[in-house]
Every structure is written in C-alpha cells, then in structure tokens.
Amino acid sequence: MHVSNTTYRTLVIRLSLFTKALEDMIGFAVITILSVFSRKTKFQNMHKRFLGCEAMRKLRVAIVGAGLIGMRHADAVIRHPQATLVALADSNAQSLSRGLSALGDVRGYTDYKRMLEELELDVLHNCTPNFLHHAVSEAALSRGLHVYGEKPLAETVSEGEALVSLAKAKKVKNAVNFNYRGNICVQEMRNRLKTSSGRVFVIHGSYLQDWLSRETDYNWRLETKGPRSLADIGSHWLDLAQFIYGKRIVKVNASLFTSWQKRLNGDKPIDISSDDGASLSLRFEDGLLANAIISQVSGGYKNHIALSVDCENYSMRWQQQAADRLVIGRRDGGEETLYADSAWPSAQGKRSSLPAGHSQAWADALSNAISDFYEMILSDTSSPNVATFEDGLNIMKLAEACLASGRDGTWHSVE
Ligand SMILES: NC(=O)c1ccc[n+]([C@@H]2O[C@H](COP(=O)([O-])OP(=O)(O)OC[C@H]3O[C@@H](n4cnc5c(N)ncnc54)[C@H](O)[C@@H]3O)[C@@H](O)[C@H]2O)c1
C-alpha cells in the first residue's frame, strides 16, 4: 500500500495527539483518586488545576504598614495574577492616605486589628517597624492567615520562637522577606555551585549603606537594645550566604563599632550604644570560612550588598547595585560579566525574568520572592527560595551571637 508523505505525517500527528490525550486522561484519573482518598490540599489543588478552576482562585491579601517597604510589597502583590490587594492598614492616617492614593480599589484601616476582624483574608504582609513584628504576625497567624513578614522575624529570639510554634500549630505558610533570594543572579550562583564551580574555598563580602553616616541621622531603628545594623542589613547578608552555599553558619566571631555615641534626633541629643556596623568572621557547618563587613556609615554606598564565592574553577561575585550582572573571575582569562538572562535554567519559572540587557533589579527580586511564597500557598508545597519563619529565627540567633561575640571577643556557636 502506498502512503503519501502527507498522509504519513497526518497519521503521526493524530497518533501523538491520541497518546497525549491518553496520558492526560490517566493523569486526571490518578489526581482525582488521590484528591478524593488522600484529602491532601496539594492533590485537591492539582485536581482543580486540571479542571481549570485553579486559575480562578485569587488570594485575598492585606498589608500592614504603608511605609517604604509596605508600598513595594503592594506593587508586587498588584503585579501577581493570582492575588488581589484587598486592604492596607497604617496607624498613621497621613501615611495611610498617601499609600491608598497610589493604589486602586483598596480599603484603608488605621487599626489593623479591626481590619482582621472585618475582612476575610488569605495572606497578611507584615511591613511594620521591628517592634511590632511579633504582635502583628501573631494576630494574623491566630486567625489562620498565611504571613509574609518583614525582617527581622521579631525583636527577640523568644518572640521569634513563639511565632515559629504558632505558625506550625496553625499549619499556615510563613515567610520572612529575605528578598535578595529572588534575584536571578543569586539563583544562578546557587545553581553553579551544584553544576560547574567545583569546590568552594572561601566566601566574602559586605553590606554597606550610608544613611546613618551623619550625627543628625536618626530613625526608629536606632532605638533597639538588640543587634541593630546586624539585624537590619547583616541579616540579609547572612541569609544570602547561607542560601547560596546551601549550608548553615554554626560559629561566629564579630567586632562591632558605633561611629556616633551621641546622635541628634532633631535638637535632642540621644545616647547610642547599638552597632553602626561590624566585621564578621563566620564558619559554616562543614568548616568553610566566610567573612563580611557590615556598615551603615559608609559614604556613597547606598545599598551595596555584595558577595563573592571563590571556588576551584572560578570565583563568582554579585552586588545588588548592579543587580543584573554576575561576574565570573578565572585565573586564566580574567573577568567575564554575564547579564542576567531568562534563558538561564535557574531563571525558569521566575515571574520577572527578562531577556539579557533588560535590567532586572531590586523590585523584580521582591516580586519573585513574593511570587514563590504565593506558589507555596496555592500548591501547598514548600520552596527553598522562600525563607521561612524558622530560617528567620536562625538568622536572629546568628545576629544575637554576633552581638554577644562583639561584647566578649570570643567565638560563639549557633545551633
Ligand atoms: N527587606 C528589605 O529589603 C527591607 C527594606 C526596608 C525595610 N525593611 C523592613 O520593613 C519594616 C518597615 O520598614 P520601613 O522602612 O518600611 O519603615 P517605615 O517607617 O517607612 O514604615 C513603617 C510604617 O509602619 C507604620 N506603623 C507604625 N505603627 C503601626 C501600627 N501599629 N499599625 C500599622 N502601621 C503602623 C508607620 O506609620 C509607617 O508608615 C522594617 O521591619 C524593616 O526592617 C525591609
């Protein structure tokens, strides 16, 4: 029998369509059985996706704190197709109305407790000053909401532990906003450690800012008794180093400094004892050494978080102020600058991935981080890209250990 090329191609296409349909039917049957008999949310959500219902599901989100970071969270929430920003709360009526004026149809509250009582919500973003992190997150968790909280997790380790236990008891998803994890160069560094870099020899870097370099610089952040620059920005560096290397820091030795023993809050002189910065020596669980300088008094460094991982085959370094560049340094051939690229395997699935040369920066990393968290809720999974409350607690313990080491000059262990 003669079969023409066209007929043959048509037969192959039909056969492959039939096979695909059969695969889909088998997949659908398995997921249906699992969703009915296991009663696990993960399978129920997969089942809904098969039925096309999941696309309809939108998370109802509220933000508490309409300051610098709260409004950046609002941008990221609005950009997410499966989230609706329902409400914004801020105790300062002026901040609230400024915040609301930048948003669409969003309800405003000056009392976040009232907001929690009145509204049906799925997720709460806690963007308040540090001293309120525990109270606001506790109120949301108690109502069974998923919580995306700003760093640090809380002000004290015991408050942090209480939040970790409550989140576990309520079986809700939780995250601390270590947003630099969402940058795709950072993801690429983590990926390269698994694929091509070879053994890691040393990790080093810094987190430098300058907004506290003058005597007249004053802000609520200075009013803490605990670690200050260590908690405010050191926490980001510690999380980033652990995230990229994929191992925990277990020993710290820190020297802290305070550049202004007295600052002026307006005309009022205030005694300052908290850290403007620190020099950190760190040991990972496998013995690897790392080192970082933290400072909020370094002129011209606006938000310079930088990290170099020096490996057997090459070193790689990234810094936030050139957020879409990854520099690879080789013993033979010098330096090569790679542009962040959505074609990288490590960038797959990222909400903000763009072709190389279309700068991806701070807001994109935040958007990715929030998107990873929502995916955890929608598919009832976990993600290494999301820093949980437990991770946040670990970072608090590291910052406390640095503070203690700064006081007694010895190495401190962190469990
Ligand atoms: N992840 C990051 O990169 C990043 C960057 C900046 C700030 N932060 C964190 O975000 C938090 C907020 O920092 P910020 O810079 O936005 O501060 P901010 O001072 O700009 O904003 C805080 C807001 O909280 C409001 N607020 C105070 N008490 C409140 C209450 N009882 N109820 C509701 N709202 C209240 C204030 O009126 C203010 O509008 C801090 O914990 C900080 O560490 C994180």
Image: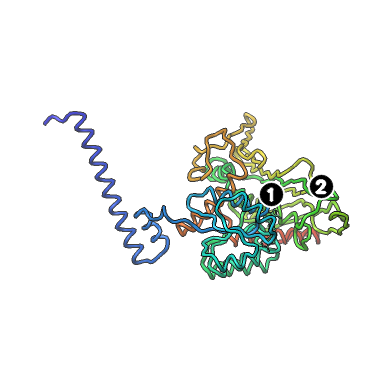
Q: Quadrant of ligand 1?
A: bottom right
Tell me: 370 left or right of 296. Answer: left
The front one of 374 and 392 is: 374
Kindly identify the amino acid type of the residue bearing the numbered disc 2.
Ser
Residue 331: x and y in percent read: 64, 33
What residue sits 71% from the left and 57% below the top?
A: 231
Toward which corner of the image does residue 328 lie, by quadrant?
top right
Q: Which residue is mark 2?
A: 213
Kindly identify the amino acid type of the residue bearing the numbered disc 1.
Ala
Mark 1 packing: few (<14 Cα in 10 Å), some, or many (20+)?
A: many
Tell me: 56 left or right of 203. Answer: left
Residue 395: x and y in percent read: 66, 58
Q: Is residue 189 above or below residue 118?
A: above
Q: Which mark is residue 290?
A: 1
Rounded to the nearest angstrom, the CA distance separating label 2 from label 1 is: 26 Å
Residue 414: x and y in percent read: 67, 62
Image quadrant in which the C terminus is located: bottom right
Mark before the other along the chain sequence, 2 or 1: 2
Outermost residue, left side: 1
Q: Is residue 217 above or below residue 196?
A: below
Q: Secondary structure at mark 2?
A: loop
Comparing labels 2 and 1, the label whose residue is closer to the camera: 2
Query: Is residue 353 in sight in this rendering?
Result: yes
Q: Secondary structure at mark 1?
A: strand
What residue sits 26% from the left and 45% below the top?
A: 19
Circle count: 2
